Image (cartoon, rainbow, N blue to C red):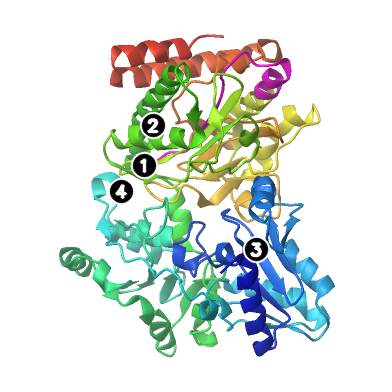
Amino acid sequence: MTVNERLTALRIAMKASGLAAYIVPSSDPHQGEYVAAHWKAREWISGFTGSAGTVVVTLDHAGLWTDSRYFLQAEEQLKGSSVELHKLNIPHTPEHLEWMQENLPSGSKAGLDGRLFSVGQVRHLAKKFHPKNIDLDTTSGLISDIWTDRPPLPQHPVFELEVKYAGASRGQKIQAVRGKMEKADYHLVSTLDDIAWLFNLRGGDVPCTPVFYAYAVVATDAAFLFIEESKVPADLKGKLNKDGVIVMPYTSIELFLKNIPTGKIISVDLASTSNQVFNAIDSEKIKEGTNITSSLKAIKNPVEIQHFKEVMRIDAVALVQLYRWLDETLVKRPVPESEVAVRLNEFRQAQGGYFGESFDAIAGYNSNGAIVHYHAEPGTCANIKPEGMLLLDSGGQYLNGTTDITRTIALSKPSVEQKRDFTLVLKGHIALGNVKFPQGTTGVQLDILARMYLWQNGLNYGHGTGHGVGFFNNVHEGPQGISPTAGTPKASVTIEPGMVTSNEPGLYRAGQYGIRTENLVLCVEDEENDFGKFYRFKTLTLFPIDLNLVDEGLLSDDEKAWINSYHEKVFASVSPLLNEAEKAWLKEKCGKI
């Protein structure tokens, strides 16, 4: 079926259910960013493949709401369908609800699949719709009825992440959760990256993230893992049982929650628990709380931190090999953008302990670099030539850590404007990377450091500045983030020692080029005095910055010193892993300014 034919089928189902509107999110029942093909309902109904967005279908309109990262991509992918792009003014905000309030008649009914919305989201919807007397049906899984060739749920086996990588046993992690349960007898965990972290398990059910579909419940005397049992090898199941973890069928979670004994209390995070799962619990047994594992997981232990440092060296080797290959190949022939991603994946694979990309690599040549989450398709993507600029944002999933790095390079002599833009972005990157801040500081307080030089020149970028990064886990990990939007939960979380966060300001000129410089940084303790504790960031990523794009006249002496010191560190850390030709290439790229 075409997108328009799918919309017609959905509207027939809506009429039969008495619905004036139907909301289709990007999520799965676990509120994951990356979802298995089985759960890509929003993509199926609209044709838009970006990772963020919401579709609202009424009887006479179909709209996609997404943020500035995807405007260009959405405009291209929605061509030929009746789905209209609604551009979000503020990223990650439910502006589609305002549209629904204005356009749905009073007394009408909107529907959604309650598995795909958290309790908090459903409550917010109900509150928004109440003044106009719009009812909300959370039991209408209409997409399931009309998506006849829907892919099945994935069945990849899970495997154990050894303690030598994890730094703590699953028993220690379970005990840490129990220590924070605060008068609750049970704690429900729905988020896949948290479940993987808690049990020191990894899987392959979701693209780019080594997780598996499951639920978890931690009790005071046991822990329960709800997973398709055929995915757990017998020897691993024995280890889990020995550690007090009881393996139960994935589909039995609702029955288990329904049968929690009278008088017992279960702690539930409203932001990550699906409305359907939540409704299986008797209301008097619920204690509304937060996801305990999220904050525990964010603070990397010393073993994880050491592995992070090592994986940055390994990843840098692959990057050196990729950029050298690109230099040599461009002299001979144009290189499709998609080939860059393929070759980089091959170079990473050769390093060992590699499990795949941490997200789909973004190789954006010239104007494609201005599409923040651009994805090059073989056969239709641009051919890179030895002229202009290339933005490459990529990352890897390794047994000993997760990487995420962006570099922008000049393929020919850059213009004055390009050098100015690049340098203003770099100044913000350095300012954030060098900041010293008091205990209790949040991401929204730090964000201005990355933007101030752009703002002073009437420039800006439309995405957040930083996100948390997991350990061989979700590359976009909570709870922390660095963002200018005060209302977002991640931006209001305090930055604590042990957190690994990205530092990635950018600038995008539509139709011309994009610029982004991204390193991962580790929050560490700096000093404690009469004014309290102070923290700072330590840069983990190891790869040179293209000095051909730097306007030295815009840099202070301190900024020049930072670049030189960083390049010295990159060469000292990475060069011992390189052959002589690679070492010579890196030496040249790690020049002084």
Q: Assess whether mark 1 and mark 2 are in contact (beta carbons under 8 angstroms).
A: yes
Crowding at dot 1, Cα within 10 Å, few <14 / some 14-19 / many 20+, comes out as many
- How much space separates mark 2 and mark 3, taking CA atoms? 35 Å
Q: Assess whether mark 2 and mark 4 are in contact (beta carbons under 8 angstroms).
A: no
Q: Which residue lies under the disc numbered 2?
A: 312
In the image, the segment drawn in magenta is 402-423
- In reply to whether residue 369 is colored magenta, the answer given is no
- How much space separates mark 2 and mark 1, taking CA atoms? 8 Å
Mark 4: secondary structure:
helix
Q: Assess whether mark 4 and mark 1 are in contact (beta carbons under 8 angstroms).
A: no
Along the viewing direction, whichever of 375 and 96 lies nearer the viewer: 375
- In reply to whether residue 416 is colored magenta, the answer given is yes
Q: Which mark is residue 477?
A: none
Q: Which mark is residue 401?
A: 1
Q: Which residue lies under the disc numbered 3?
A: 54
- Residue 320 horizontal/vertical position (percent): 40, 23
The earlier-in-sequence mark between 1 and 4 is 4
Q: Assess whether mark 3 and mark 2 are in contact (beta carbons under 8 angstroms).
A: no
Q: Which residue lies under the disc numbered 4?
A: 166
Mark 2: secondary structure:
helix
Instruction: Single out the mark in the foreground, 3 or 1.
Output: 3
